[in-house]
Amino acid sequence: MFKYETHLHTSETSACANSTGAEMAVKYKEEGYTGIIVTDHFFNGNTTVPRDLPWEERVELFCKGYENAKAKGDEIGLDVYFGFEYTYHGSDFLVYGLDKQWLMNNDRIMDMKLYRFLDHVHACGGRVIHAHPFRDYNYIPMMTFAPHRVDGVEIVNTSHADPAFDERAKTYAEWYKLPVTCGSDAHNTTDRWYGGGVLAEKKFTSALDYVDAVIMGEVTIIEKK
Ligand SMILES: [Zn+2]
Ligand SMILES: [Zn+2]
C-alpha cells in the first residue's frame, strides 16, 4: 500500500504553520509516506503573502512552501504535489490538479462568488474536496456547503480534538453520497502532527490521481496516530 498525506501546511506560506516545506517533507518521509500534497492557505485564508503586491508576485510567494517541500522531496525520495486551501468565510475547500501557472493566469478568482470559483476550477480540470465541513471553532463564523460542486468530503481530519466534527462530516457525505477522504491539516512536525491521510493500492503520479482514487472509493482512511 502507498501512504499519502492530502492536506498540510508550510510556514513559508501559511501564517499559522511552524515547519517549513522541507521539514514537512523530511517528517513524512521518516513516517513512511510515499507522498504528500501541500495545501497552504490561499489569499483568502491565513496566508503569509502580503495582499498589496502584484498578483504574479503573490503567486510566486504563495508557491514557496510547496516548492521547498518538492525540492526536499526530490532529494530524499518523497513525492510532493501541489494543492491549495481556498477559504470562504471560514469554510475551506481543498483544490487539487491545478498549478502555479494556472494561478498566474487566473488573477480574477478572488473576485468570484464561491460557486463560480468551484465551477471554474472544474472547468479548468481541477478537483475540490470540502475540508473538515463541520469544524466548529470560533474562527469559523458560519458553515457553507456546496454538495453539488465538490468531488468529496474530508470526513476525518486528524487535527480535530472533538470527534463530533468528523461524525457530522460522515453523515453529510452519506446524505449526498459524496466520496470520502482524510487529511491531517498538519501545521508542524511535532506538537501538531497527528498522522492521517490515506492508503492507496496504486501509486499516484499527480494530485489528480489522488482525487480520482477518492472518487472511485479506492482509498483507505488512516485514523489518528
Ligand atoms: Zn492554518
Ligand atoms: Zn488546512
Image (tube, rainbow, N blue to C red):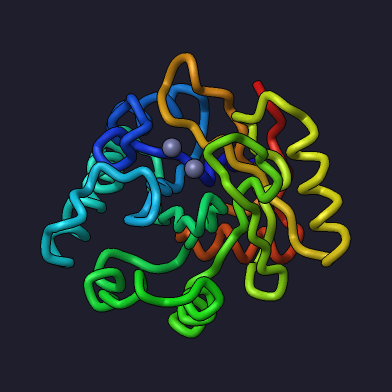
Residue 88 screen position, x and y as percent: 50, 59
Residue 62 screen position, x and y as percent: 25, 52
Residue 46 screen position, x and y as percent: 37, 43
Residue at 76% over, 48% down: 169
Residue 141 screen position, x and y as percent: 58, 47
Q: Where does the N terminus fall, quadrant-wise? A: top right
Give the camera-side residue of 83 and 111. Answer: 111
Residue at 25% over, 42% down: 48
- Whether residue 35 is visible to the viewer of this picture, yes or no, is no
Left or right: 216, with 195 as reference point = right
Q: Is residue 26 above or below residue 60?
A: above
- Whether residue 92 is visible to the viewer of this picture, yes or no, is yes
Left or right: 46, with 119 as reference point = left
Residue at 46% over, 43% down: 36
Give the camera-side residue of 169 and 78. Answer: 169
Give the camera-side residue of 94 and 134. Answer: 134
Res 51 quadrant in image: bottom left
Q: Is residue 65 above or below residue 16?
A: below
- Location of ligand 1 given as a quarter of the image: top left
In this view, which residue lies farthest toward the top? 191
